[in-house]
Image (cartoon, rainbow, N blue to C red):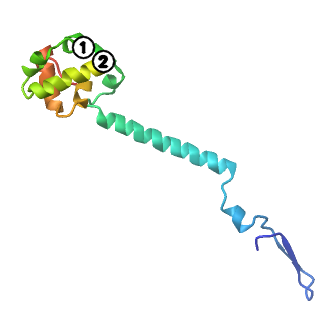
Amino acid sequence: MGTHRQNRSASSGTEVVDLSINSPEEDRTLKPRERIFLLIILALVLASIIGIYAVRSHKSGSFSVLIADETELYDLSIINNATVEDFMEVSGIGEVRANAIVSFRESIGGFTDIDQITYIDGISDSILEGIIEYFYGENQETK
């Protein structure tokens, strides 16, 4: 089949016509409209995956906190001016971790988000909660 052919039957005088005009190789390629459709589907899947990751990786159950500027929740000048000794007062932070916090803070030019502290090895969410409680009081909650 594949190519445009006409077969004639000599005995009956009828004509058999194969109307397919695409070769098998051409049938395997995507048409421009199909390519656009697939790209749109891929973009939607990618956006969904990114959205799910953003929601799951965030520590809050509310979208309003996702949109809010997190630096407004805490006065970051407090932890940006804290000394090694100040951090050592927090439960779970010894001299090594306190030095790591201060060194990291200096390397990035100061914290712009309280969660940046968890980028440091050995600083878990529970230690971050201890830092927030120590520097900002018991009434503050982590995001």
Residue 60, position in %: x, y? 26, 29
Kindly state the secondary structure of the residue where label 1 is placed: helix
Q: Is residue 56 above or below residue 65?
A: below
Local packing at callout 1 (Cα closer than 10 Å; few below 14, some 14-19, many 20+) is: some
Q: Can residue 31 be seen at all in this image of the molecule?
A: yes
Residue 132, position in %: x, y? 16, 20
- Which residue was labeled with disc 1? 76
Which dot marks residue 111?
none
Towards the viewer: 79 or 102: 102
Residue 67, position in %: x, y? 36, 22
The amino acid on which the numbered mark 1 sits, given as a three-letter code, is Leu
Kindly state the secondary structure of the residue where label 2 is placed: loop
The amino acid on which the numbered mark 2 sits, given as a three-letter code, is Thr
Q: Can residue 114 be seen at all in this image of the molecule?
A: no
Counting residues from the N terminus, which is met first, the one under dot 2 or under dot 1?
Answer: 1
Which dot marks residue 112?
2
Q: Say which residue appears at 12% left-offset and 20% top-offset.
A: 87
